[in-house]
Image (cartoon, rainbow, N blue to C red):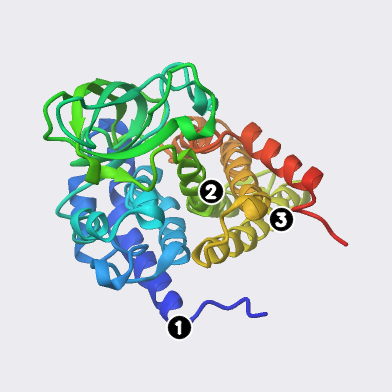
Amino acid sequence: MDFELSDELTALQHSVRRLARDKVKPRAREIDRSGEYPADLFSAFKEAGMLGLCLPEELGGSGAGILGLTIAIEEVAKYSNSAALMLLLTRLPTGPVLIAGTDEQKHRYLPGIADGSVRAAFGLSEPQAGSDVMGMRTRAVPDPDRQGGWILSGTKCWMSGVREADWYTVFAKTAEPTSRAHDSVTAFIVERSWEGVEVGRIDHKMGVRGVDTGELLLDGVFVPAENVIGEVGGFRLAMLGLNSMRPIVAARGIGLAEGALMYATEYVKQRAAFSKTIADFQGIQWEIAKCAVDIEAARLLTYRAAAMADAGKFTKEYVPYLSIAKYHATELAVRASGLAVQLLGAAGYMEDHPTEQWYRDAKQLTIVEGTSQVQLGLIARGVIDGDLWWD
């Protein structure tokens, strides 16, 4: 058992760390204040070859896998979770295509993600169907005039990167809208330029600003048969795609927690109080120590989960291990950002310091791609079913 990163992954970590310090850190606060898409950071990621980390070399990527992307996101998230989300979006919508797409789909849609010429987004949630995915109402019906084609109608919401995307992975009911059978949902690749595709309302968010989140409106959109991902009735594909994403979301939490704790620690080492520094007080030291322990535990859980996902271990029996990483790391982000604000006191609550930004950004991580409560349910089911067991 080797806990060291390979030479290649270590080199990746160091190069992304430099880029994050030089490019992301100086821009993080302005991105949060303006809410404008950071095209300059997208270009920096493109030039550094970071947009194809999780894609295989034959599709224009670097083949660093989910672990490589996890490591990169951890470094970037120390300063900006918006920038980290840009990297996450190279895997979330492409995941179903990588898992179940045809060779033609992979070669048509994925090289552009790797070279930065196109972007994509993921459409699963709907206004009345968040955690209850089977409550979706977006409908796909066979086109009576074009053999094998489908007509999609409905609204997807809370889609990250919806305004910048050139194509979308969209899940829709291919059976009766009221059906809750898993074979009633199918995945499609939908291009932004097609007739009937429109970006709707853009949300105003508490945090993670700079990457738009909003609605995708589908009004009688024709989707050819060759743009069905996997099988018709392949709801399991949505779950496999999300399962494999758990360590990537967890990495955003780890990076945020690291950034917040490092910043707060530097502050308390310099802040004088009662004839000493705040860092000299044992109570403060204990809080820093507990957070550091949690960060290291989260990293080990997350790197293991990423290695499992790269090995194709994201089916039901492995779900508890993936969910543990996502749950622990994202809840840690909330705790660590809260601690950072508290350690700075009144200063931490002010916009003079990035602690208040980390505090706002952290909460999103416990909601997206499976809430903390959903993760707890999956972990508990794993124990009950014996997938997570110790004898």
Q: Left or right: where does residue 22 sit relative to residue 272?
A: left
Q: Amino acid at mark 3?
A: Ala
Between 319 and 278, the one nearer to me in the picture: 319
In this rendering, is residue 12 above or below 308? below
- The furthest residue to the bottom: 7
- Quadrant (top left, top right, bottom left, bottom right) of the C terminus: bottom right
According to the image, label 3 marks what residue?
289
Sequence order check: which comes first, mark 2 or mark 1?
1
Sequence order check: which comes first, mark 1 or mark 3?
1
Sequence order check: which comes first, mark 3 or mark 2?
2
Choose mark 3 or mark 2, whichever is in front.
Answer: 2
Residue at point 23%, 68% (across, down): 60
- Quadrant (top left, top right, bottom left, bottom right) of the N terminus: bottom right
According to the image, label 2 marks what residue?
243
Instruction: Find residue 259 and report its horizontal and vertical position in percent.
Output: 49, 52
According to the image, label 1 marks what residue?
7
Q: Residues within 10 Å of mark 1 (few under 14, many from 20)?
A: few
- Say which element carries label 3: helix
In space, the residues marked 2 and 1 are separated at their CA atoms by: 27 Å
Instruction: Find residue 263 and report its horizontal and vertical position in percent.
Output: 51, 51
Residue at point 42%, 66% (across, down): 65
Q: Left or right: where does residue 42 sit relative to residue 186?
A: left
Instruction: Find residue 379 and report its horizontal and vertical position in percent.
Output: 71, 44
